[in-house]
Image (cartoon, rainbow, N blue to C red):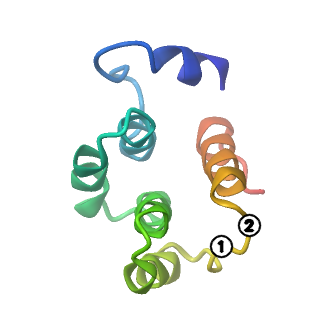
Amino acid sequence: MADFKASLSNDAPPPALSPSLTALWWAAKGNWDAAHKIVQDESSAEAAWVHAYLHRVEGDLGNAGYWYRQSGQPAAIDSLEAEWDRIVFTLLLGERT
């Protein structure tokens, strides 16, 4: 997790990041368009989960609900910050929480 946070000071994401983590990297940098573009064409459950989170942050709850269902995740009931931590922790460590 520290490496991910440290990489945010770079101008581009590390090349070894998965598409889902790359999307989160762009979201952390405030570039929501880039984040959406990365996950919109991915078919993995993790990408759908990240896509749901992006829509949730933007207040687009209809699309967020759709992408949560696609990911197999329940609709988030925790804070945005807690969900961010859960997503990043899960994707970086490969463990479901």
Q: Which residue is mark 2?
A: 78
Residue at (61, 74) in percent of width and height: 73
Q: Nearer the viewer, residue 33 or 73?
A: 33
Secondary structure of residue under mark 1: loop
Q: Is residue 41 left or right of residue 26?
A: left
Alpha-carbon neighbours of circle 2 within 10 Å: few (<14), some, or many (≥20)?
Answer: few
Q: Is residue 80 left or right of residue 17?
A: right
> Vertically, is 45 above or below 26?
below
In the rendered structure, which amino acid carries the disc numbered 1?
Answer: Ala
Residue at (59, 44) in percent of width and height: 91
In the rendered structure, which amino acid carries the disc numbered 2?
Answer: Asp
> Vertically, is 2 above or below 20?
above
Secondary structure of residue under mark 2: loop
Outermost right residue:
97
Residue 59 % position (x, y)? 44, 72
Residue 53 % position (x, y)? 50, 62
Tag of residue 76: 1
